[in-house]
Image: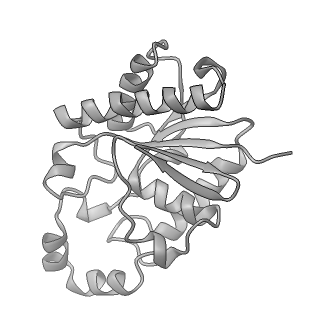
């Protein structure tokens, strides 16, 4: 049996994204730019489905439980002329938890916990933020999520979970994935052991 294809969308921009503050499990709504990005991603998805000759209504849609992902999903589904609320929620898609650093910028993290920050700089995958999660543990839950898929799936989640999925599926190494920029307003397609970006 072939492996499921994942059409993966990172949530649109929030004010915290725009100001470099790490959100983690905090529920920050989309800003105006983020709402436009969500609609844009819906248009890209529609084009991909047309290219692949499949109906948008035939695939399962699933989102992270965090509001910014759900808001993105509903705007995206609206752009596809699908019922807004007809999608699943999966807690495994929630963003990596940043613990005590949530709401902070990188300079603030460095100032508040210089030793942990330095350790994490040398091993971003294995060292968790204080009171938060490591990328290694997020990779385990993303692998578990992927292994549970029964069909090709549209997922709306986060930058951290995208990096973890890249590693879980062997597309990237932890070193390569840890500093990758995961863009907003685009669609990443995980298929056949690779990941392609569509903008």
The residue at the point 34 percent across, 31 percent down is: 40
Image coordinates of residue 7 in percent, x first then y, are 55, 40
Residue closer to the observer: 94 or 86: 86
Farthest right residue in view: 1
Q: How is the image coloured?
A: one colour
Relative to residue 139, is residue 65 depicted above or below?
A: above
Looking at the rendering, which quadrant does residue 127 occupy? Answer: bottom left
Judge from the rendering whether residue 85 lies leftward or rightward of residue 113; answer left or right: right
Looking at the rendering, which quadrant does residue 53 occupy? Answer: top right
The residue at the point 50 percent across, 26 percent down is: 46
Judge from the rendering whether residue 181 lies leftward or rightward of residue 58; answer left or right: left
Image coordinates of residue 178 in percent, x first then y, are 42, 71
The residue at the point 19 percent across, 72 percent down is: 109
Image coordinates of residue 100 in percent, x first then y, are 26, 64
In the picture, the quarter occupied by the N terminus is top right
Residue closer to the observer: 65 or 150: 150
In the picture, the quarter occupied by the C terminus is top left
Judge from the rendering whether residue 101 lies leftward or rightward of residue 149; answer left or right: left
Image coordinates of residue 150 in percent, x first then y, are 75, 37
Judge from the rendering whether residue 86 lies leftward or rightward of residue 10; answer left or right: right
Looking at the rendering, which quadrant does residue 169 occupy? Answer: bottom right
């Amino acid at each position: 049996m072939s492996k499921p294809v994942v059409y993966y969308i990172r949530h649109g921009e929030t004010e915290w994204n725009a100001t470099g503050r790490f959100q983690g499990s905090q529920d920050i709504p989309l800003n105006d730019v983020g709402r436009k990005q969500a609609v844009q991603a819906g248009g890209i998805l529609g084009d991909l489905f047309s290219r692949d000759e499949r109906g948008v209504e035939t695939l399962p849609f699933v989102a992270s439980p965090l509001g910014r992902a759900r808001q993105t999903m509903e705007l995206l589904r609206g752009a596809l002329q699908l019922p807004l609320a007809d999608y699943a929620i999966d807690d495994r898609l929630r963003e990596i938890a940043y613990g005590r650093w949530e709401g902070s910028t990188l300079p603030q993290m460095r100032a508040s916990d210089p030793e942990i920050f330095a350790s994490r700089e040398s091993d971003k995958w294995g060292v968790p933020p204080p009171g938060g999660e490591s990328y290694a543990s997020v990779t385990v839950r993303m692998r578990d999520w992927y292994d549970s898929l029964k069909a090709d799936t549209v997922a709306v989640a986060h930058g951290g979970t995208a990096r973890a999925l890249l590693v879980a599926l062997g597309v990237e190494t932890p070193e390569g994935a840890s500093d990758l920029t995961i863009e907003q307003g685009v669609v990443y397609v995980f298929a056949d052991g690779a990941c392609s970006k569509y903008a």
